[in-house]
Image: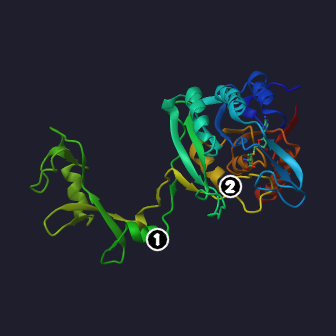
Amino acid sequence: MLKSVNPESFISKLIYGENLAALKTLLADYGLRGKVALVYIDPPFATNGEFKISKDRANTVSMSNSGDIAYSDTLVGCGFLEFLRVRLILLRELMSEKSSIYLHIDNKIGHYVKIIMDEIFGRNNFRNDITRVKCNPKNFDRRAYGNIKDMILFYSKSQDPVWNNQEVPFSEDGVQRLFKKIDNNGRRYTTVPLHAPGETVNGKTGQEWRGMKPPKGRHWRCSPEVLDALDKDGLVEWSTNGVPRKKIFADERKGKKMQDIWDFKDPQYPSYPTEKNLDMLKFIIQTSSNEGDLVLDCFCGSGTTLLAAEELSRRWIGIDSSEHAIRVVRKRLAEISTGLCCEVEYDLIAF
Ligand SMILES: C[S@@+](CC[C@H](N)C(=O)[O-])C[C@H]1O[C@@H](n2cnc3c(N)ncnc32)[C@H](O)[C@@H]1O
């Protein structure tokens, strides 16, 4: 039987068993209500197939002929949606006020799942429906376009979730496209307007600067004194007809904001069927949690979430009902122990 634990001295947990019972135990016996900072789940997608694994390889598509069944994905329709719904309700109970949940699903069933997420987490707390490019283009025989994407539904528990904004680096191509101009020192730059939408009636940013009012319906981005300082520093470019714009240099920008189309392809030679991209999990964990936080994945499969959390100094709980999944997680955790120069510490619990 599981004992109560102090969340502050919490040791990460790998739980082998059915996640409904495990989630109830985490709530009732572990005192973890409101303690989870981030949930990522990648449940079965109601494909009505079986995913197999053999000694040397895992199959990425269901219904392959060889190997043992790693997990069955045979619950479909309303039964599948209800299966998810009851687990999502428990997950919400475990989540802290500043937490987020990312639910990975495909586009066949994902729109129905979104309605359930809206019901449980609230439409206000919907943040993104992320399109994830999962593989290279395919040549299907089917009379349809190639399917290279799935979706991640991202919700927060409240309006104030943890958010560590991460910029993504510009590609070489992107730098040339976005920063087309080159100054006398060979630096690439672009220009943006010095004014922004919205009129200021009495404020400084609505006043004249160098004999010019901001255009109708707009205000200067900064006060006339700051505009003077920018101009003095050579950061304002004047067009031939006297319109000022602010210079933005490529070498001063770390990158651009991540958008809602992600390119994180899954491993070509996975250790487990439907294993997800480790860098994608690291990106999610870094953005939506802080060091020391508790990350939960109750469909953990090969443990990609757990590895990412461990490498980023978060505590974690992984749950899976497949013995193959648990074996692969343990192997992967043992492998990263070498890189981290110490044994990964966790409790292994069987229900
Ligand atoms: C799509 S896989 C997860 C893959 C994982 N994201 C990875 O990177 O390896 C779904 C996992 O959910 C597990 N699973 C399905 N139903 C479960 C349940 N009721 N309780 C616990 N695990 C379950 C399966 O055994 C399977 O390993």
Ligand 1 quarter of the rendering: top right
**Numbered circle sitting on residue 319:** none
Seen in the picture, residue 1 relative to 300 is either above or below; the reply is above
- Where is residue 122 drawn, in percent x and y? 53, 28
- Where is residue 132 drawn, in percent x and y? 59, 52
Query: What's the residue type where badge 1 is placed?
Result: Asp
As rendered, which of 165 and 328 lies closer to the eye?
A: 328
Residue that carries the numbered disc 1 in the rendered image = 173
- Where is residue 343 drawn, in percent x and y? 83, 51
- Where is residue 71 drawn, in percent x and y? 82, 44
The response on whether ligand 1 sits within 8 Å of label 2 is no
Q: Residue at x 25, y 59 (%)?
A: 230
Q: Residue at x 64, y 63 (%)?
A: 138
Q: Residue at x 20, y 46 (%)?
A: 218
Mark pair 2, 1: CA separation: 24 Å
Q: For the C terminus, which image quadrant?
A: top right
Kindly state the secondary structure of the residue where label 2 is placed: loop
Packing grade of label 1 (10 A; few <14, some 14-19, many >=20) is few
Q: Is residue 5 visible?
A: no
Query: What's the residue type where badge 2 is placed?
Result: Asn
Seen in the picture, residue 260 relative to 229 is either above or below; the reply is above
Residue that carries the numbered disc 2 in the rendered image = 277
Figure quadrant of residue 180:
bottom left
As rendered, which of 192 and 184 lies closer to the eye?
A: 192
